Amino acid sequence: MALQLSASALGRLREIFAKNDKARALRVGVRGGGCSGFSYLFELDENEPTEKDKVFEFEEIRVYCDKKSYFYLNGTELDFVDELMGKRFTFNNPNVESSCGCGESVSFKVQ
């Protein structure tokens, strides 16, 4: 398994990267915090990957994920949704055991 991007996420990332010529990749990961234990990291990265990163390529879009975070994100699909409450990226992660009421933090089965 690996990280995946949905077609809608790939399309939205193309739009974002077209407006930011310094960004080299999207960085995703997990960090400790939030009421359920972990929160997702999602940011543009202007640097080259380090030896601690896994690199995924989806056509012209590169995604970096540090190896510790990959333990929790393996099998995750990054999606972009347009819902009643607005447009946003989501992590469809099969490793999530529960999430908090606000949806900003998660706990994992694989802890």
Image (cartoon, rainbow, N blue to C red):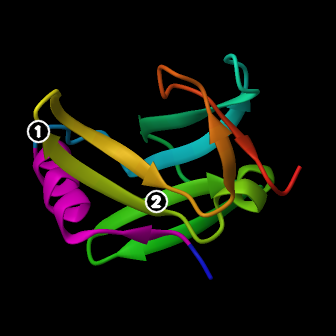
Nearer to me, 88 or 25: 88
Q: What stretch is highlighted in magenta?
A: 3-18
Main SS of the magenta segment? helix
Q: What residue type is labelled 1?
A: Lys
Q: In this view, does 86 lie to the left or right of 39?
A: left
Residue 6 sits in which quadrant? bottom left
Q: Residue 69 carries which label?
A: none
In the image shown, does 17 or 32 lie closer to the viewer?
Answer: 32
Label 2's element? strand
Task: Say which residue appears at 23% left-offset and 63% top-offset.
Answer: 10
Q: In which quarter of the image is residue 70?
A: bottom right
Describe the element under mark 1 as helix, strand or loop.
loop
In the image, residue 95 lies at what x, y percent?
A: 68, 59
Residue name at image x 11 percent, y 39 percent: 19
Is 14 a magenta residue?
Answer: yes
Residue 63 image label: 2
What amino acid is at disc 2? Val
Q: In this view, does 33 lie above or below 3?
A: above
Q: Is residue 74 magenta?
A: no
Judging by the rendered image, the residue that carries numbered circle 1 is 19
Residue ID at (59%, 71%): 75
Q: Which of marks 2 and 1 is in front?
A: 2
Q: How far apart are marks 2 and 1 (CA)?
A: 17 Å
Which residue occupies 14% across, 61% down? 11
Residue at the farthest right position: 111
